[in-house]
Amino acid sequence: MQIIQLKKFGNILVSRPAGQEAFNAIRPQLDPNTPVQISFDDVLTVTPSWLDEFLTRLTDFNQGKVELLPTDNASVIITLPILAKARQDLVAEVVNRYLDKMGLNN
């Protein structure tokens, strides 16, 4: 299991291009067969576009073996249901697993 600390990309994560750039930066360190966990520690805010771009590329890369670690970050908690409703793919599965685990899914 590998942990991706999103804070290494900054504490304010906005825009699709920045999400793509973050994934491209971390990709050489990833093994597509190794599950990853994503930590939101020390991230102040993340937008739906940044997280969508980053998660889409990551879940495509490792076939959905992604776990979102618990967080009390309000921007993450607000963003995740938006992604789950907007998508019908591996990203939605990853997000819904998290929402179910945290008791946030309706």
Image (cartoon, helix red, strand yellow):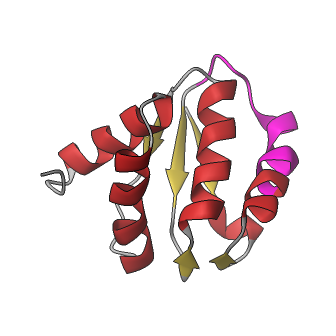
Task: Give yes or no for residue 95 being in the magenta stretch.
Answer: no
Image position of 59 (left or right of 103): right
Q: Is residue 53 above or below residue 47?
A: above
Find out whether residue 27 is within the magenta segment. yes
- Quadrant for residue 32, please give it: top right
Q: How many marks?
A: 0
- The answer to whether residue 76 of the structure is visible from this angle is yes
Compared to residue 61, the image places residue 92 above or below, namely below
Q: Which residues are magenta?
A: 22-34
Q: What residue is drawn where x is 73% and y is 75%? A: 10
Query: Residue 49: x, y in percent?
Result: 62, 62
Q: Nearer the viewer, residue 40 or 52?
A: 52
Furthest residue in direction front, as rendered: 86
**Which quadrant does the N terminus fall into?**
top right
Residue displayed at 46% across by 29% down: 89
Q: Residue at x 69, y 26 (%)?
A: 61
Q: Position of residue 71 (x, y in %)?
A: 36, 66
Write the residue at 43% across / 68% down: 76
Q: Is residue 13 left or right of residue 47?
A: right
Say if residue 43 shows up in the picture: no
Tell me which secondary structure the magenta stretch mostly adopts: helix
Q: Is residue 2 above or below residue 85?
A: above
Q: What percent of the width, then of the height, locates residue 57?
A: 69, 38
Is 67 positioned to the left or the right of 19 in the image?
left
Q: Nearer the viewer, residue 1 or 104?
A: 104
